[in-house]
Amino acid sequence: MLKNKVPVLILIAALHLLMLPNTFSQKKIKTIVVDAGHGGSRDPGATGQYEHSLRSKEKDITLAISLKLVEELKKQLPDVSVKPTRTTDIYQDPREKARLANEFKGDLFLCIHADGGPLKTGKRQIGTKEETRYKITYKKVKKKKVKISTPYKVTVPVYEYFKLPLTRSGTSVWIFAPHKTSDKLKAIMEGGEDFEIETDNADSTFNDFDFNSPEGRTLAQIYAKRFQERSDLLAKYVNNEVEKTGRAALGVNQRQVGIRVLQSTNMPAILIETGFINNPEDERYINSEKGQQELAEAITAAVIRYKEQVEGTNKTSDTKPAEEKATPAELESRPTKDTKILQVKSDKVKIEIYDDGEIDNDIVSVYFNKDLVTGNRALTAKPYSFTIDLVPGKTNELVLYADNMGSIPPNTALMIITDGVSRYEVRLSADLKNNASIRFEFKSQKPKPKP
């Protein structure tokens, strides 16, 4: 009897999720999986290679931070099961890590890594040495040209070569890229047994559900999108909490080459590059007890914020009316310093946003009057277009929030704005400490009295 009802219930759940794309259902966070990247002699990960480095191995740093993160999560979230993928120096294939996470039925996957980066080679003179060289001359002997080689000594410099340290430092957070959704779909469809279908007020668990059916694939696609949104939310919270420690927070990123453990896990998943192992300051920080504990506490604080958001959205008692809308956490965490004032002639304004200058992988979120217009948007030479409706007599503000710094800081955007009468070009510059904004001034025109 239950099996006959499943497709109908699935379609109802799918319809509910499609109608509410920007909300989160009331699913409880019961299990968190923590993965220490790399491991074993086969896969040490990045290593400290610059001159005078600590010769750290990424596998050791990730394990140390992961163990502290597991303990911190258990301490602050005693009702949540926290599962590490490894607790010792062993090698695990990324597919094995994903399989373990799916077997644990995780609700979150936190993957700990450390960045490496290509190193430039320097050289310096360490002394001199004598070399024998030969001067070649020619002499005629009985009408023949004879080569004569005369040795002489020269002093030449002796050089040594060494690796220069990276200048880039900071912590970055990564999520799986949208173009890798097919892998996420596969993970959902292969891990469908006992999969929890999220409905408005409760979770429903169905056994033996076929995600390869038409209804199942529809739902799997919705869940893949939902996992992307939730991964992005958690990643932003982690970036915010890292920023509070005073470290350089490098934003939320999407690697164009896929990250296997993020794609193949049947849950929201993020990867945290805790620091650059080939930057001297970062290497000392991620090797220190203080730095490791600080990162563990920052990630835990982000998980708690995420858990409260996911589990508390359906509570209606604290809902504020529209005019008392709370400022999103991302905007609240940074002041807005670069503000442009623009007077427009219409209450309907079209905006096209481009990367300004060289295309350098700038990623931004855009808010209008505290509502998210687009999140984690990569700026390119091709515009992202949208239309906003201005409210006469009120402050209408469009805020640019930098999710990363691109390869050429700061994060810059060109906005082409048209109001049906005039065209404007506005350039905004934001970074990981300050937002930028445009404030629109619009006054409705009263009709002129007839003569």
Image: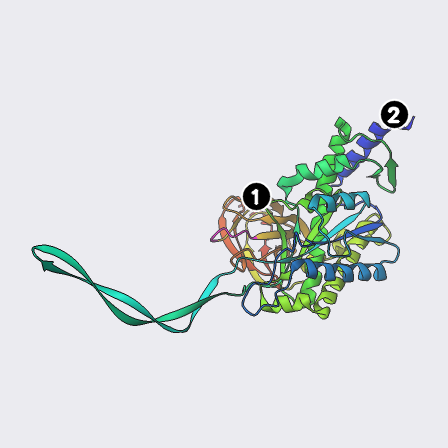
Q: Is residue 398 left or right of residue 139?
A: right
Give residue 230's mark. Answer: none
Q: Is residue 153 left or right of residue 339?
A: left
Chief secondary structure of the magenta portion: loop
What is the residue that sits farthest to the right in this orientation? Answer: 1
Q: Position of residue 440 (x, y in %)?
A: 59, 55
Amino acid at pointer 1? Ser
Instruction: Name the residue that disc number 2 marks.
Output: 4
Q: Secondary structure at mark 2?
A: helix
What is the residue that sits farthest to the left in this orientation? Answer: 143
Label 1 – label 2 distance at C-alpha: 44 Å
Q: Position of residue 349 (x, y in %)?
A: 57, 46
Q: Position of residue 169 (x, y in %)?
A: 59, 63
Amino acid at pointer 2? Asn
Quick one: label 1 or label 2, which is nearer the N terminus? 2
Residue at 87% in and 38% down = 204
Give residue 385's mark. Answer: 1
Along the line of sight, the residue nearer the viewer: 308 or 84: 84
Q: Is residue 210 left or right of residue 242?
A: right
The magenta stretch is: 357-362
For the residues carrying marks 1 and 2, which lies nearer the camera in this image?
Answer: 2
Say few, some or many: other residues with alpha carbon within 10 Å of mark 1 (under 14 / 14 to 19 / 20 or more). Answer: few
Q: How is the image coloured?
A: rainbow
Does residue 199 show up magenta in the picture? no
- Please tell me whether residue 203 is drawn above or below residue 325 in the rendered image: above
Report the quarter where the N terminus lies. top right
Q: Secondary structure at mark 1?
A: strand
State the image quarter where residue 102 is shown.
top right
Residue 376 showing in the rendered view: yes
Residue at 58% in and 45% down = 256
Along the line of sight, the residue nearer the viewer: 276 or 327: 276
